[in-house]
Image: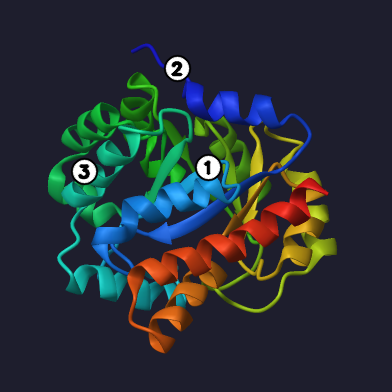
Amino acid sequence: MTTQSNQRLQNTFQRLAGRAALVPYVTAGDPDPRVSVPLMHALVDSGADIIELGVPFSDPMADGPVIQRAAERALSKGMTLHKVLDMVREFRQTDTQTPVVLMGYANPIEAMGQQAFVDQAAAVGVDGVLTVDYPPEEAEEFAQALMAQAIDPIFLLAPTSTDERIQKIAQLARGYVYYVSLKGVTGAASIDIDDVVRQLSRIRRYLNTPVGVGFGIRSPESARRIAEHADAVVIGSKLIQTMEASMQAQDDPQLAVDTAAQWLSTVHQALIK
């Protein structure tokens, strides 16, 4: 089976050459399915280099309460994996450059069927897939199916990852690797920059793939400090909290989109200084 890396992700990291990519995470369908595609475009306009689009799932074990609530809201409004793929197709009608990475859990993919999912993801323009509960030891066949369609399989690393696990992921990972900077779930305590630097040094002994850092990045300043060492900065919980607070103050999904985009632009400005 021939495999190839995803061109949009490759081009993005080559274009940035020396600056960390800004990667916002949002849950598809939150705060409202009607504004999910406009939200994706607004984030790009505010400086996003890659979009991580969360596929809502009823048991998001790796996610903290903020992203869990986002998934619950999206599911309550009828979001499904098929609809997430439709959103990517709509986004691609007017944005053919920004990479879109789907992030989620195995259950919806298994329900659709791995090959059917891969074929549909390729057809709509998905660039990478990060499946939290597909460990590399069990994901080789799925990773090969993705790469056969030029979709990058993206894997998580954590502070607890052994050197052996890093080497295993180095064999399969394409696009970038997502380093989870904290033990625990998303949205947890503040990030330890010094520890991240040590861990990135260890990870890079075994792989050449770009390394993105997420979990615990909650301000432009913490994003800037991580960006000095990482190839990408991933921000999810804080961005979703920003929309959640906007919706609580005024039940207006478009206003929530605007608020999130404005906040992300402050992070982008910190990264390009």
Local SS, label 1: loop
Query: Badge 1 is on which residue?
Result: 50
| Residue 82 screen position, x and y as percent | 17, 47
Residue 4, numbered circle = 2
Contact (Cβ within 8 Å) of mark 3 with mark 1: no
Residue at horizontal 55 percent and vertical 37 percent from the top: 168
Mark 3 residue type: Asp
Question: Which badge, 1 or 2, comes first in the chain's sequence?
Answer: 2
Q: Which amino acid does label 2 sit on?
A: Gln
Residue type, numbered disc 1: Ile
Task: Note whether 15 is above or below 191 in the view shown.
Answer: above
* Mark 3 to mark 1 CA distance (whole Å): 18 Å
Question: Nearer the N terminus, badge 3 or badge 1?
Answer: 1
Between 205 and 116, the one lying in front of the other is 116
Q: Residues within 10 Å of mark 3 (few under 14, many from 20)?
A: some
Of 180 and 214, nearer the camera is 214
Q: Place residue 105 in its image quadrant.
A: bottom left
Label 3, on which residue?
A: 86
